[in-house]
């Protein structure tokens, strides 16, 4: 219980909520003491508006983002107050302003949260329109609130400058451990492989998000302010985690075949699975150690687990003396090799967290890191390119603008007490995708109703304003904390906080609760209907684009692997970039599938085919990772023409799939004939054997081992051919179906 509370309060979400709570509460307390509650409350509102723009990044970007957001919120509030008395000018300008702010999402996450902050400030501005000099004073106080929030945020930053990245790294280690555990589950006899692979794909979405968060902070810090020993250490750990993930993905064994082969000797597979589980458990324990800031002492002896696997393989070999079976030995040797690599990477992370690690251990890892970040520049072309109905951002901007204007009309003609709350509800709930808007609508309505009744019950029995004030601060803190964790719980606490504040200011609170629930229901209903009927961005329209990106990313990864196999040397930055993009795009494809599954059944066009393509692309990535890992970790011979010819065929198959998606596959020249491919594979086998025999004389056992390793490359190439052909065929079926349904 105590550990769970400590874990909750030490988390990133609680820390962020604590910052905005302090920045909002302190001005209210200070100015209330001086007899100027309104001033303190306005400053608190400014802090609240600015808070969303404080996203993970280096210090320079953080400061610039918060200041620009604070200025924008203040200026927009002033503009609304100035123009409000002139409705014929005010409403057209308001509509254009809302549309422009929504379109800023085209510039990425930072611009999205900044525009969200300004939109929230627009809705709250309708709560109290100022005139005369009060307009300037009010806007100035809002800006002061934003700057005060920045001050509080900087204090937190300097008190614990590395805590955020430590927590993110701990979460990344935990997710990687979970991924390794799922890979271990595949070794269970009669395992539900379909369910396990689906869990892996869902997990990849989470891993992509946390990888991006870590890159934003670590790499940005390296490129703008140099690299400290701590930064280098965390970079080394992050790179090792990425490589562990690649290794885990590369262990793409045929588990059915393995179980059939070792049914009579299950000890080998059980020993390997125990090692796989202990790898995951070691990482999970390490994640806890990082969060607690305690010295890491492993409970698991991975070296002993490796020795146990080696002994199990030796026993298996001894049992085969009467009936030799080199294929089984080859499979087990390959498994042992991957296990050794995983243990090696985990030991790197353990040493990095050890107290004995020195600065020279982390040198040379921060080269070309800035290439792994998306450049931060904002050309006008990005905005103009999105000004069309083909853009999801354009549709959402137009949809939100019209919905807010309709809400203002409804509020003008119907007796709503707090019309601004309808606007606020729409802005908070409405998202570019139907599924998330629908989910948030129900969660906000339920949270508001529950929070309203709980707060009303508390106010009915508690009359002491000091107690109510303390409860409102606690609810505010918890409301902000749960925003990213559980939106329904967040809505419950935020509603309680608002009702408690009004309970202090207004004796008759029952009407407020009723109107707040009514306003929330109206806002949620408008948001839901708008997303359904106003130029909806159904995910099946976006699926071809996501598929193209995923296939192209895998294609680029294959190209880099082939280049490395031909040229040898060290791993290039372009190779690592291609690998990163392949992981990201498979996660994006799965996220697109998730959004599609949340939409109405009638809009889930060919959902099984989309999932099949996601699995095929994931399997292709797994095979590529296996080939790339093998080439990196072995001294390979020169790449032959046959190898390049087979890789070229895989590349052409993926090109065909992309051409189908882009509707220009009529010019596709066709695949390499099966007979020619068979000749290439025969050539690969004979070349490998010839090169080995003509090289340095080696023992027969070593020769057989080398041939088995060469066989792994050939098997992966055959698997890549089959996968790429299936991707092209399935893509054609999907595209034809989507085209027919789009025309109906």
Image (cartoon, rainbow, N blue to C red):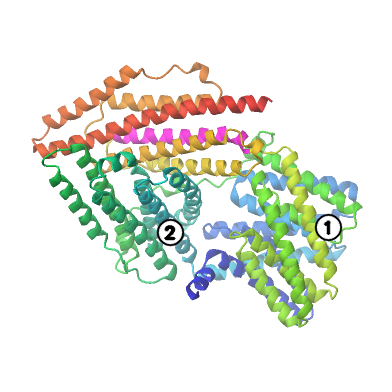
Q: Residues within 10 Å of mark 2 (few under 14, many from 20)?
A: many
Q: Which of disc 1 and disc 2 is earlier in sequence?
A: 2
Quadrant (top left, top right, bottom left, bottom right) of the C terminus: top right
Number of marks: 2
Stretch in magenta: 539-566
Seen at 14% across and 38% down, the residue is 324
Element under disc 2: helix
> Is residue 551 on the magenta stretch?
yes
Q: Residues within 10 Å of mark 1 (few under 14, many from 20)?
A: many
Query: Image height check: is 324 above or below 304?
Result: above
> Is residue 547 on the magenta stretch?
yes
Label 2 and label 1: CA atoms lie apart by 45 Å
Residue 366 visible in the current orientation: no
Q: Nearer the viewer, mark 2 or mark 1?
A: 2
Q: Position of residue 561 (x, y in %)?
A: 34, 36
Residue 452 visible in the current orientation: yes
Q: Position of residue 514 (x, y in %)?
A: 82, 64
Q: Disc 1 marks which residue? A: 419
Seen at 70% across and 61% down, the residue is 447
In this rendered view, identify the residue nearer to me: 463 or 550.
Answer: 463
Q: Is residue 554 left or right of residue 51?
A: left
Q: Position of residue 84 (x, y in %)?
A: 87, 54
């Amino acid at each position: 219980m105590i550990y769970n509370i400590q874990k909750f309060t030490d988390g990133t979400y609680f820390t962020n909520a604590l910052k905005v709570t302090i920045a909002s509460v302190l001005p209210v307390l200070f100015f209330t003491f001086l007899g100027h509650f309104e001033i303190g409350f306005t400053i608190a509102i400014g802090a609240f508006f600015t808070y969303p723009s404080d996203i993970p990044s280096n210090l320079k970007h953080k400061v610039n983002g918060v200041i620009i957001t604070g200025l924008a919120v203040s200026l927009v509030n002033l503009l609304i107050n100035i123009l409000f008395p002139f409705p014929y000018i005010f409403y057209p300008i308001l509509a254009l302003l809302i549309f422009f702010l929504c379109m800023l999402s085209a510039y990425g996450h930072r611009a999205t949260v900044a525009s969200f902050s300004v939109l929230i400030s627009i809705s709250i501005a309708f709560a109290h329109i100022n005139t005369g000099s009060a307009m300037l004073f009010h806007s100035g106080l809002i800006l002061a609130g934003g700057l005060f929030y920045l001050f509080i945020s900087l204090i937190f930053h300097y008190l614990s400058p590395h805590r955020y990245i430590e927590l993110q790294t701990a979460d990344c280690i935990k997710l990687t451990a979970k991924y390794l555990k799922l890979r271990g589950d595949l070794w269970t006899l009669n395992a539900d492989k379909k369910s396990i692979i689906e869990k892996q794909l869902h997990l990849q979405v989470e891993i992509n998000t946390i990888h991006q968060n870590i890159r934003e902070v670590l790499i940005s810090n390296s490129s703008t302010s140099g690299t400290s020993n701590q930064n280098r250490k965390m970079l080394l750990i992050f790179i090792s985690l990425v490589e562990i993930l690649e290794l885990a993905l590369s262990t793409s064994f045929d588990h059915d075949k393995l179980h059939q082969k070792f049914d009579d000797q299950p000890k080998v597979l059980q020993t390997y699975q125990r090692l796989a589980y202990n790898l995951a458990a070691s990482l999970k324990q390490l994640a806890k150690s990082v969060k607690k800031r305690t010295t890491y002492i492993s409970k698991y002896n991975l070296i002993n687990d490796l020795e146990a696997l080696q002994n199990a393989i030796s026993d298996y070999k001894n049992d085969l003396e009467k009936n030799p079976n080199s294929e089984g030995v080859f499979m087990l040797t390959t498994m042992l090799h991957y296990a050794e690599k995983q243990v090696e990477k985990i030991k790197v992370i353990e040493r990095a967290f050890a107290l004995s690690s020195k600065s020279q251990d982390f040198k040379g890892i921060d080269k070309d890191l800035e290439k792994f970040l998306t450049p931060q520049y904002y050309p006008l072309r990005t905005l103009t390119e999105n000004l069309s109905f083909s853009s999801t951002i354009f549709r959402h901007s137009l949809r939100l603008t019209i919905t807010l204007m309709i809400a203002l009309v409804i509020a003008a003609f119907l007796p709503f007490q707090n019309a601004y709350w309808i606007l606020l509800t729409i802005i908070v709930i409405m998202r570019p995708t139907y599924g998330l808007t629908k989910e948030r609508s129900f969660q906000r309505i339920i949270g508001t109703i529950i929070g309203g009744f709980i707060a009303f019950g508390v106010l009915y029995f508690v009359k002491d304003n000091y107690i109510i004030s303390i409860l409102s601060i606690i609810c505010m803190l918890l409301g902000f904390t749960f925003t990213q964790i559980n939106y329904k719980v967040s809505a419950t606490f935020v509603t309680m906080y608002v009702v408690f504040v009004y309970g202090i200011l207004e004796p008759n609170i029952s009407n407020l609760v009723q109107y707040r629930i009514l306003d929330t229901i109206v806002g949620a209903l408008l948001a839901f209907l708008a997303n359904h009927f106003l130029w909806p961005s159904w995910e099946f329209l976006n699926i071809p684009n996501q598929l193209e990106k995923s296939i192209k990313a895998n294609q680029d990864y294959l190209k880099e692997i082939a280049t490395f196999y031909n040229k040898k040397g060290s791993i290039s930055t372009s190779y690592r970039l291609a690998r990163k993009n392949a992981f990201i795009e498979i996660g994006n494809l799965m996220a697109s599938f998730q959004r599609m599954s949340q939409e109405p059944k009638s809009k889930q066009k060919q959902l099984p085919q989309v999932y099949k393509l996601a699995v095929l692309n994931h399997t292709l990535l797994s095979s590529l990772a296996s080939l790339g890992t093998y080439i990196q970790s072995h001294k390979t011979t020169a790449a032959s023409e046959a190898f390049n010819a087979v890789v070229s065929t895989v590349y052409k198959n993926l090109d065909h799939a992309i051409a189908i998606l882009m509707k220009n596959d009529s010019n596709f020249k066709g695949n390499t004939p099966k007979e020619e491919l068979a000749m290439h594979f025969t050539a690969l086998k004979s070349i490998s054997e010839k090169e080995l025999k003509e090289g340095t004389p080696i023992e027969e056992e070593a020769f057989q081992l080398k041939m088995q390793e060469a066989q792994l490359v050939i098997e992966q190439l055959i698997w890549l051919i089959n996968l790429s052909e299936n991707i092209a065929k399935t893509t054609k079926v999907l595209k034809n179906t989507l085209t027919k349904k789009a025309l109906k």
